[in-house]
Image (tube, rainbow, N blue to C red):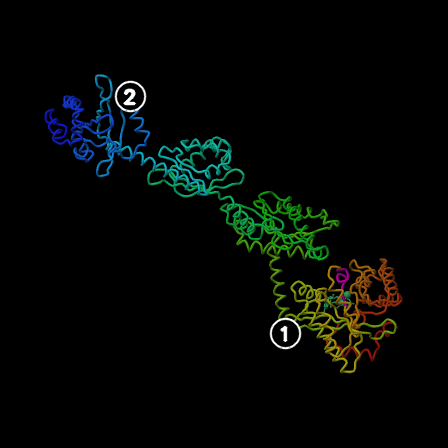
């Protein structure tokens, strides 16, 4: 067994194995070897022993030396010790060793040698110089122990550490490249790893975040610095908030949102890793949240006024209606601005927009914060008075809103007065029906308010609904009547005061529904409110022109025939063309026709189309008469804007003529001014001889009224003309 040889054996074996060089060396150093042999038994059996001379030439090796170096003794003895150099140590390592031992000191160190097969082995080495009697160095004894296993272990550890270090750097590198905040907490809930994105998430406390800090400490510091937007200021609220957050953190699962101060939002997703770490990823979703909010805002609000829109109002109504509480008493108010279109048309859409915004503001100021104020479109608003308590309270608010409209609205350098019609429907959660049904009821009330003369309000009642239903039925019937050509005209004769002779007719619309005549004024208002006015107008024109043609065929002279025309017809730019074409198609000339327009036509400065139409007709010889003069605000100066040829004094003046209310003076003034302006005057509604007489004396030009003849249907016209020829009725009356 290596290391177990006795001293004699050792010497023997070494003499046997030693080569020629070794022998010489051995001779020199044999006393050293012998001395070593005497210690042999005391040496650890694993000791590797070698002796070299002063120059490092090997003089002795024990078996262990040969075994570990894998060289035979023969190869080793006489060889330089540097044969075993592994190249692992730098030259300075050996220089230092030689410096030590050459001065007679013992050197100790860990040396990596290379065995014959190229493998490396480590030996713990002690080299002691051997001095002779004179004190000079004769050689060196080296004692070595195999520490290869330990060194390899150390190296592996070193490598492992290095690898870990590299991994950690890589890991940090990787999480640093992640744009989100990443924070990893260990089993003790201490921050083990985080990136700068995580610090960026928390703008107030981020820079102070350090590894090793417990999660709770980080959280509480962030709260103290006001990092979170939704932590309540009270102690209990704050504690609850912290507890919830800790619970979420320690049992991570679903992602959740954190509201930060400064209107920022974080999405937090925490997971527990397989090795027990809590890994949190925090994503700044502020942009997303803001975009989301913007979209929600756009979906809920009216972009012009910032009020709610129709959809939100319906949702609000729905919430009120479907409330669990049975005793809720709310009210819906629909508002329509009066004559908004005129403001838009005259002052432009920009001014119209300013007005809409201002009105929205005033409505908001009139109601509570909990109420809903919406713009439904155009000039329509809706206000939902939530839990208003009673109808009386709702009416009080509506009055307040109406009053709020009284102050003029400044639009640039102009200021305009606004008014609105208000329709109110009560909303009882128990019997309201659907939101659309509530809106319909408020709409019916609004319609009623408009009919009541605008700038007022109406409260929905079932009677109203009945009347609306009736009206809708009438509109449908009228539509059918137009399609079936059932619209007729009655002609009321007009006579000349000068000689009592027939001068013409006024054509008046007639419609028999269910064997009853519908009053012309009612029919016209129905048609105007339902867009049927142009169709009715066309029927009247065609019926009138046909009757005129029939008269002419029978050798009668119809004279000037006046046709009533509504403002809506005149706004249609095709009207003049169509009317002139129809006149021509029936074989008449423009000069035989008069169109009667009402004051609102003359006063409507917003629509250029009316002027264009009137001028075009006038150029074609058609005369224009201003109907019902004196009932509105038109003054004679207004008439100069359009080519008006006739003024028709309203029936009310004629009726009061002989009643001594000073009407006589007014009528006289009108006639005289009209003549000064080159117009002729027609008096309508003459029912008595006294009226006739007075008007004639005042110089009025034409007469119309029941006294002379009532409006007559086509079949009565022949008799009228026969009467005219036979009795000369006017002359007889005047006489
Ligand atoms: P208007 O154009 O002023 O027509 C005169 C109205 O006075 C007619 O009523 C006529 O029947 C009535 N009337 C005539 N003489 C007398 C009288 O001596 N005493 C009384 N109490 N009434 C008299 P009507 O036919 O019911 O027409 C009412 C209004 O309806 C018309 O007033 C006119 O504004 C409108 N209208 C009639 N036909 C048409 C039409 O074809 N188109 C348009 N746009 N409006 C029409
Ligand atoms: Mg008329
Ligand atoms: Mg009239």
Residue position marked by numbered label 1 in the rendering: 484
Highlighted magenta segment, given as a residue range: 596-604
In the image, the residue with mark 2 has its CB under 8 Å from the nearest atom of ligand 1: no
- Furthest-bottom residue in view? 554
Which quadrant of the figure contains the C terminus?
bottom right
Could you tell me if the residues under marks 1 and 2 are in contact, i.e. CB atoms within 8 Å? no
Q: Residue 530 occupies which quadrant of the picture?
A: bottom right
User: Taking 185 as reference, is 492 left or right?
Assistant: right
602 drawn magenta: yes
Label 2 crowd bin: few (<14), some (14–19), many (20+), radius 10 Å: few
Element under disc 2:
loop
Element under disc 1:
loop
**Residue toward you, 290 or 630:** 290
User: Taking 711 as reference, is 253 left or right?
Assistant: left
In the image, the residue with mark 1 has its CB under 8 Å from the nearest atom of ligand 1: no
**Residue toward you, 163 or 292:** 163
In the rendered image, residue 214, in percent from the top left (x then y), is placed at 41, 31
How many circles with numbers are drawn on the protein? 2
In the rendered image, residue 435, in percent from the top left (x then y), is placed at 54, 53
Q: Is residue 672 above or below residue 718?
A: above
Q: Earlier in the sequence, mark 1 or mark 2?
A: 2
Q: Residue 711 occupies which quadrant of the picture?
A: bottom right
In the rendered image, residue 172, in percent from the top left (x then y), is placed at 41, 39
Which mark, residue 103?
2
**Residue toward you, 266 or 63:** 63
User: Taking 617 as reference, is 46 left or right?
Assistant: left
Which quadrant of the figure contains the N terminus?
top left
60 drawn magenta: no
Q: Quadrant of ligand 2?
A: bottom right
């Amino acid at each position: 067994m290596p290391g177990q040889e006795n001293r004699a054996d050792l010497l023997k074996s070494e003499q046997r194995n030693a080569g020629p060089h070794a022998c010489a060396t051995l001779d020199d150093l044999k006393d050293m070897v012998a001395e070593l042999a005497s210690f042999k038994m005391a040496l650890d059996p694993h000791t590797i022993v070698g002796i070299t001379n002063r120059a490092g030439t090997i003089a002795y090796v024990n078996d262990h030396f040969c075994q570990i170096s894998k060289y035979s003794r023969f190869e080793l003895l006489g060889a330089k010790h540097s044969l075993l150099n592994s190249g692992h140590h730098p030259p300075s390592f050996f220089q230092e060793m030689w410096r030590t031992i050459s001065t007679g000191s013992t050197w100790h160190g860990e040396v990596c040698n290379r065995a014959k097969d190229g493998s490396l082995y480590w030996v713990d080495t002690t080299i002691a110089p051997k001095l002779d009697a004179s004190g000079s160095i004769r050689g060196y004894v080296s004692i070595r122990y195999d520490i290869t296993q330990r060194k390899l272990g150390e190296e592996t550890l070193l490598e492992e550490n290095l690898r870990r270090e590299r991994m950690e750097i890589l890991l940090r590198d990787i999480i640093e490249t992640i744009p989100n905040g990443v924070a990893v907490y260990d089993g003790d809930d201490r921050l083990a790893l985080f990136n700068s994105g995580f610090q960026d998430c928390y703008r107030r406390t981020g820079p102070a975040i350090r590894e090793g800090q417990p999660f709770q400490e980080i959280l509480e510091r962030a709260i103290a610095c006001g990092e979170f937007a939704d932590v309540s200021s009270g102690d209990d609220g704050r504690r609850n908030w912290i507890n919830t957050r800790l619970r979420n953190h320690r049992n991570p699962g679903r992602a959740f949102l954190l509201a930060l101060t400064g209107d920022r939002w974080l999405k937090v997703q925490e997971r527990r890793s397989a090795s027990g770490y809590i890994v949190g990823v925090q994503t700044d979703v502020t942009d997303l949240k803001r975009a989301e909010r913007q979209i929600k805002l756009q979906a809920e609000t009216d972009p012009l006024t910032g009020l709610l829109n129709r959809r939100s109002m319906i949702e609000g109504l729905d919430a009120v209606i479907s409330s669990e509480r049975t005793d809720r008493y709310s009210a819906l108010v629909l508002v329509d601005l009066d004559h908004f279109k005129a403001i838009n048309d005259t002052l432009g859409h920009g001014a119209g927009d300013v007005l809409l915004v201002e009105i929205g503001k005033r409505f908001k100021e009139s109601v509570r914060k909990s109420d809903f104020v919406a713009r439904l479109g155009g000039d329509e608003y809706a206000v939902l008075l939530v839990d208003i308590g009673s109808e009386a309270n709702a009416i009080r608010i509506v009055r307040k809103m109406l009053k709020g409209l009284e102050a003029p609205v400044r639009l640039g350098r102009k200021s305009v007065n606004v008014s609105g019609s208000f329709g109110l429907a009560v909303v009882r959660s128990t019997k309201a029906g659907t939101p659309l049904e509530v809106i319909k009821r408020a709409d019916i009330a609004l319609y009623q308010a408009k009919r009541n003369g605008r700038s007022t309000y109406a409260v929905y009642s079932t009677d109203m609904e009945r009347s609306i239903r009736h009206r809708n039925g009438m509109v449908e019937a009228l539509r059918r009547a137009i399609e079936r050509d059932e619209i007729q005209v009655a002609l009321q004769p007009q006579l000349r005061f000068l000689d009592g002779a027939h001068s013409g007719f006024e054509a008046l619309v007639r419609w028999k529904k269910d064997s009853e005549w519908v009053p012309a004024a009612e029919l016209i208002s129905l048609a105007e409110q339902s867009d049927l006015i142009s169709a009715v107008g066309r029927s009247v024109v065609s019926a009138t022109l046909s009757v005129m043609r029939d008269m002419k065929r029978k050798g009668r002279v119809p004279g000037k025939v006046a046709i009533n025309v509504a403002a809506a017809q005149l706004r249609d730019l095709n009207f003049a063309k169509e009317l002139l074409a129809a006149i021509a198609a029936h074989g008449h000339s423009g000069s035989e026709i008069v169109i009667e327009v009402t004051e609102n036509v003359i006063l409507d400065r917003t629509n250029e189309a009316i002027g264009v139409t009137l001028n075009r007709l006038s150029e074609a010889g058609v005369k224009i008469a201003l109907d019902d003069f004196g009932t509105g605000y038109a003054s004679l100066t207004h008439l100069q804007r359009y080519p008006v040829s006739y003024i028709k004094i309203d029936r009310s003046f004629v009726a009061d003529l002989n009643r001594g209310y000073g009407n006589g003076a007014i009528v006289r003034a009108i006639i005289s001014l009209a003549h000064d302006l080159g117009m002729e005057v027609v008096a309508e509604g003459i029912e008595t001889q006294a009226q006739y007489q007075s008007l004639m004396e005042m110089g009025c030009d034409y007469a119309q009224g029941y006294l002379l003849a009532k409006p007559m249907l086509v079949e009565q016209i022949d008799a009228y003309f026969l009467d005219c020829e036979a009795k000369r009725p006017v002359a007889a009356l005047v006489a």
